[in-house]
Amino acid sequence: MTSTEPLLSLRHLSTEFSTTDGTVARALEDVSFDVHPGQTVGLVGESGCGKTTTLLSIMRLLPVTARITSGQVLFNGKDLLALSETDMRRYRWKELSIVFQGAMNALNPVMTIGEQIREAIILHDLMDKTHANRRVNELLDMVGIAPSRRDQYPHEYSGGMRQRAMIAMALACQPCLLFADEPTTALDVMVQAQILELLQKIQRLLGLAVVLVTHDLGVVAEVCDTVVVMYGGKVAENGPVDEVYNAPQHPYTQRLLEAFPDLNRPAGSLAVIPGTPPRLNALPPGCRFAPRCHKAFERCRVEAPAETDLGGGHTAACHLLEKAEAHQ
Ligand SMILES: Nc1ncnc2c1ncn2[C@@H]1O[C@H](COP(=O)(O)OP(=O)(O)O)[C@@H](O)[C@H]1O
Ligand code: SF4
Ligand SMILES: [Mg+2]
């Protein structure tokens, strides 16, 4: 943990989607966590738990069917949710940027990589062409793409190289906070390791803060300072990685880590926990994890647990922990 003020502070963020069958999916409820300057935060949880929605809510890039219903997204103390769209454009890509899930396939097939990176710079930074060209070269160098490949098209790139190009585009306007949504999922293991190394290198070089969404608990152990474990659109547990891994407090985190004994051997996927995450438009009353929780008791099925502060930046939301807080 650092003693600095957070760069980003999510405060009780809730987001919902209107679905085609007329129901509402409560994709995020009361999500709070902090990101400090230069820190790497891991965001983990099964598919459908709200990780991407969290990032899109922060960037204000949600689809039209989604609505942020409450909360604050404080960036250097300023609430991004209170800004007009015009003012938000001063932050998006320039202060906070994102490498999307599956973004490698989002490159324009009829433009060279160099042109696409230059477009990203000119679009957001209003730089002239000469400066933008120089910046393209800097960015390519930073992400390890040889200058000779600048004029090639996406189909001439491997998956790993395309992901490097996407990272270069995300960095085009010198953000200080980068979101990476499962940046290595579609890549083979060797290339995954190279992309993660690249992210770490860039982070050190630029002093970036990074929020990394990943399924790989080994990667979190290796590269993250803190971890936010999400379940069913809520934060189950949040804290320094060492502490959460050595003494997980939430039954969901415990289950995830139980099947992950060797931190030096990346598991590649989350543990298989019997059952499935709740459908967010048909939530059970009480704790969202109760139908799958091996420690659930009567109260869990009627009352949602509040977040318990366990000290040292470690929090978890489980009825079993409420006494722990009372004894602090
Ligand atoms: N476009 C959408 N329309 C309706 N519901 C959505 C949409 N995208 C996400 N959701 C809802 O939000 C939940 C969280 O999705 P998402 O943030 O993509 O999860 P994750 O990234 O953790 O896999 C989903 O379970 C679903 O209920
Ligand atoms: S509140 Fe109950 S159901 Fe939820 S995680 Fe804790 S013990 Fe399990
Ligand atoms: Mg996702």
Image (spheres, helix red, strand yellow):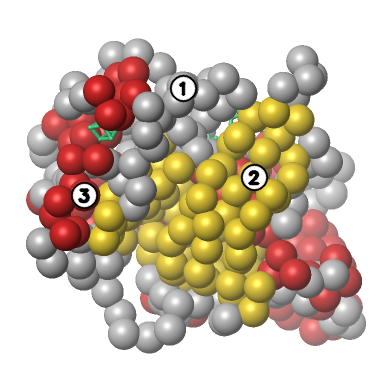
Q: Is residue 6 above or below residue 55?
A: below
Label 1 neighbour load within 10 Å: few <14, some 14-19, many 20+: some
The picture places residue 186, in percent across and down from the top left corner, at 51, 33
Q: Which kind of residue does numbered mark 2 sit on?
A: Thr
Residue tagged by mark 2?
15
The quadrant the C terminus occupies is bottom left
Could you tell whether 37 is left or right of 63 in the image?
Answer: left
Q: Nearer the viewer's eye, disc 3 or disc 2?
A: 3
Given residues 304 and 158, the one toward you in this image is: 304
Residue 98 can be seen, yes or no: no
Left or right: where 278 falls relative to 140: left
Does residue 90 appear left or right of residue 280 in this picture? right
Q: Label 3, label 2: how many angstroms apart (C-alpha)? A: 26 Å
Q: Position of residue 21 (x, y in %)?
A: 77, 15
Residue drawn 74% across the image and 45% down it:
67
Q: Residues within 10 Å of mark 2 (few under 14, many from 20)?
A: many
Q: Nearer the viewer, residue 229 or 293?
A: 293
Lateral position of residue 24 relative to residue 164, left or right? right
Instruction: Tell me residue 130's x, y (percent).
Output: 84, 82
- Amino acid type at image mark 1: Pro
Mark found first going from the N terminus, 3 or 2: 2
> Between disc 2 and disc 1, whose residue precedes?
2
Which disc, if any, is residue 284? 1
Residue at point 72% right, 73% down? 91
Rendered view: 186 above or below 212? above
Q: Which residue is mark 3?
A: 322
